[in-house]
Image (cartoon, helix red, strand yellow):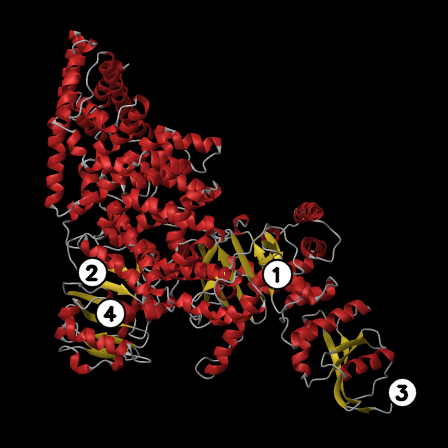
Amino acid sequence: MSALPNLSLKPLSQEPELGSADFAALEKLSSSSAPAIVKAPSQGTLRLYLSQPQSIAVVLPLLAHLGISVKNQAAFAVTFEGKDITLFELELEHTDFPQNDRALELAEDALNAVLTQEAEDDELNQLITAQQVSWRTVVVLRAYAAYLAQLGVKPTTKTIAGYYLNYPELTASFIEYFHTSFDPELDLDRQERLDHREELADRIEKQMGEITDAATEQFFSHLLEVMQATVRTNLFQNKETVAFKLRPQEISCAPAPRPLWEIWVYSPKVEGTHLRFGMVSRGGLRWSDRPLDFRTEILGLVKAQRTKNAVIIPNGSKGGFFPKGLPDRDAEKELYAQMGVDAYKLFIGSLLDVTDNLVSENGEEKIVHPDNVVILDGPDHYLVVAADKGTATFSDTANSLSLERGFWLGDAFASGGSVGFDHKDMGITARGAWESVKRHFASFGKDIQTEDFTMVGIGGMAGDVFGNGVLLSPHIRLVAAFDSRHIFIDPNPDAQTTFAERERLFNLPRAYWTDYNRELISEGGGVFNRSDKTIEINEQIRQALGIEDEVSELTPAELIRAIIAAPVDLLYTGGTGTYVRSSSETDADVRDSTNDSMRITAPELRVKVVGEGGNLGLTQRARIEAARHGVLLNTDAVDNSAGVETSDHEVNLKILVDRLVDAGEISKDERAALIEEQVEEVAQQVLRSNIDQNILLQAERLGTRPTNSAATRFIKFLSNNAGLDRDVEFLPTNDELAERRDNKERLTSPELSVLTAYSKLWLTQTLIDENFGQDRWLEPVLQEYFPSAVREKYGKHFWSHPLRREIIATKVANEVVDTAGIVFVFRVVEETGASVSTVVRSFLAVSAIFGLKDAMQQVRELAPTTDPDVWRSLVYGIQRFTDRAVRKVVQEGTLARAEVSGEIEGVMESFINRFSQVQSLCGHLESFLGGKLLERVRDNQRAVNRWGVDGALADLWAEVWEQIALVDIVSIAEQTGWSTERVAPLYFALYERFNASNTMIAITELPRVGRWESIARASLRSDLYEALTALTCKLIGFAEENGKAQPETFAQAMKLVREWEKVTPLQAPAIRRLTQEISEFINLYAAGSRRADSATISVAVRTLREIAY
């Protein structure tokens, strides 16, 4: 044997002959811990050198997965240059193993990656030597297999390896496809890559055509789809993880709903996914405990997040990660927590790996792509995250990574960090949910801020949402609650003393129900451990929870079911878990096995109101079923949206403030203080959104009509144009809607909550697509989004905000829908042919001209004890007025013409100034009226005043038709040169003479069966206004031609009308008789003695037009 001075061999069996390859391996191991594999002199033999002590029993399975099956082995202890090394001589079971240098090098690298936990050990590693590819290339295939498993395509790893090994040419094509797509070292421009990808895809499909096994072909077909849907990867950055950015909408096996973007992250230490429904999206990141289906969990959450985000600037997103290889949580708490944080960092870093940055150069901002990432999509730089289950304290960690990488959002990347809004201190999520609760109770005249009510809840006093929630009214009588450890029962609580005790607990550093002062718990109550085998049930508990008399004990799970089903006023969810399903669902459908034993069905609920401070307390089907049984509730997305909206305000404020720092307006030291000072004003802005959305939902739920055809058409429209999947959202089919219409049954609030969200999402995106936010007239909308203190000092910087268009579109969309209703824009567009932007601009014009914001503020301020019928009538009055007035402005044509010409800048301001006198005319409208018209308006005013309402809201409700007519009156004044004060009495005299008021009522009462009937009604109303305008102009011409004085009063105007009648065709007996008959019919319609029909009304309006023209 050859020998070196620094080499000693201690034989464990027959000593091997060492050659140059062996000494090269020893030299390598002297300075490295990586293994080395070399050829041995004997055929079919390899040598493995390891510098770390490893049992051959551990190493042999790893080698087998590399295609190195060992029949016999011998071991030698080697000392080389003072370092202990183990040499294994391996006799291979199969002599066809490729012993070329490339294969050995690849096997060596792969073995090192497995031993150092950079790569996983499984059958797919056989591809390294079989295909002669790196272990990182195999990680790509492993990552795709893991992703497909989350989609439900779940053959075993061994089976998948068999697929690849059985079809080596196809496997090589897949590998080539991926490298062609994303290897930055390839000398290909974008188009060449795309062309080559297409050629390779064709080749792959031809090769798949040769597969005879259906399961194999299906797997490869799914793999091709997923690869084709991949647009970015961080593979060539050589990071610890592999991340793919995907288009899930192009993946047929991806379950619905399919987001716009997904980033899939894979490594031996963590797997995760981030789902986004829009280019600008936001949502939390969850530490999942579901290794096999965490994507399903995140998909369910992002569905709710999307609807929740309808009230904020970004669309919905959600992320989740599962740390792998964690120790036992109870045995090694610190290590468990640290490994979770490390996994979170890897996950966050991977998201940033494939995300663009926004950098400023020479005063201009530009998109910068990440290094070594081939881009097959467009610019994409908006990535923001938030805390979720398991990551409540991780925001600073995420922001530190953002800052380290110079990501443009800085510490706005993850909301809720040390510089930002503390949601628990603000109590914002609970406060938002409480607005829903208050509105539900107000719908039957109960004010829970001044009257006691009973409640059961899910959560503990240490929790943000529950702890804050049960302190929002001093009149809560908390009968029972439970969290993960304890069950609290107070059968007959005193509201005042128990409120103070809950407040004490909430202020403890860490409170449990066992800390509750037992002396304050009423007779029969107590705090019980959920770990107890059984709990004794006494008479007081039976009475409080509505438990049958013969029950003397229950298990903790049974008692929790009884609490959820208790006959109290309110069920408030502030914890985690799904506790109510529909009667048509199974516990397996819910996918929350932890709480299967504690779950009830919706018909078992006996509460009046459900408030969802927490997520997923009920399934959506359960909500709908409960609502149809009379329970008042919305959805979790509506009730707890305040948290996400607060975070959105924080992010957008930070983006603005960072620009103030860059501009030298404030220092970095002043930045944090400025943000902190805005907390309460932001909270009030957020709560107003919750209030407005609840007003809308109650108005829609209590609307004057049951489910109508417009709603049916709108659902179909959203399905075709806004990504609504009625199956996923559990919305009724067209047949079911028709059945409800026949039964006079309306859509439930949970269903309306979904439609509201999609209505706002559609409207927001449409406005963005139509460049709505480019008009400087809209700058006040942007200004109002930010707190007043920031607005007053730094408003000049707002227009440069990178999300300006999105902020404006979102705020306007919310205002439109909240004021005018879910279907409003769709109906006006459908019935007038105007664009969405024109309708929305018309709405804003109407709002400015008639003071809609003041009227809406009055609605917000209505007492909770306001009679529900009165409340409904007032809100419907605003919706009705808005609908009619907007149609009037649309038909006037100025805004539509400006949009068509593309010259919209300045038009809105000019239009509103043109009609500015409308407000003053409204102030003394009665001075222009007389006869039955004045009588009707005064009757309306007296009615609304009896309700305790005055101001703008009262005027809109009492004078709906008359105020809308002022638009025509101003236009007539412009055309004729008469003042509006002279035109108005003449217009209204004609209005009275031809019974236009009752005609309008009759038109409103026409059937609303379908789209064409709706268009016919709108046309009749428009024709009536047009005829009245023409008649007024005709009367003005008559007065001028005959030297008549301009009328100053209604009486003078009516005298002029009578004088004109004497010389007009009205004197013709036939027309006079027809006009009289029509008037009589219209009066019968208005009195309810005759059903309105379009034939009679059409003749009435046509006759009036004939007189006018």
State the count of labels.
4
Side (left or right) of 456 relative to 166: left
Q: Residues within 10 Å of mark 2 (few under 14, many from 20)?
A: many
Mark 2 highlights which residue? 607
Indicate the quadrant containing the C terminus: top left, top right, bottom left or bottom right: top left
For marks 4 and 2 on the same chain, the one whose residue lies earlier in the sequence: 4
Front-most of residues 129 and 711: 711
Task: Say which residue label 4 marks.
Answer: 471
Say which residue label 3 marks. Answer: 2
Q: Which one is earlier in the sequence, the residue at label 3 or at label 1?
A: 3
Label 4 Cα neighbours within 10 Å, binned few <14 / some 14-19 / many ≥20: some
Position of residue 581 measured from the top left corner of the image (x, y, whole percent): 31, 59
Give the image location of residue 382, x and y in percent: 52, 56
Return the residue found at the far right.
2
Of mark 4 and mark 3, the one earlier in the sequence is 3
**Residue 879's x, y, as percent?**
26, 40
| Badge 2 or badge 1: first in the primary sequence | 1
Q: Amino acid at mark 2?
A: Val
The residue labelled by disc 1 is: 160
Tell us which disc is closer to us: 1 or 4: 4
Question: Is residue 174 placed above or below 209 in the rendered structure?
Answer: below
Q: Are marks 4 and 3 in contact (CB under 8 Å)?
A: no
Q: Are marks 3 and 1 in contact (CB under 8 Å)?
A: no
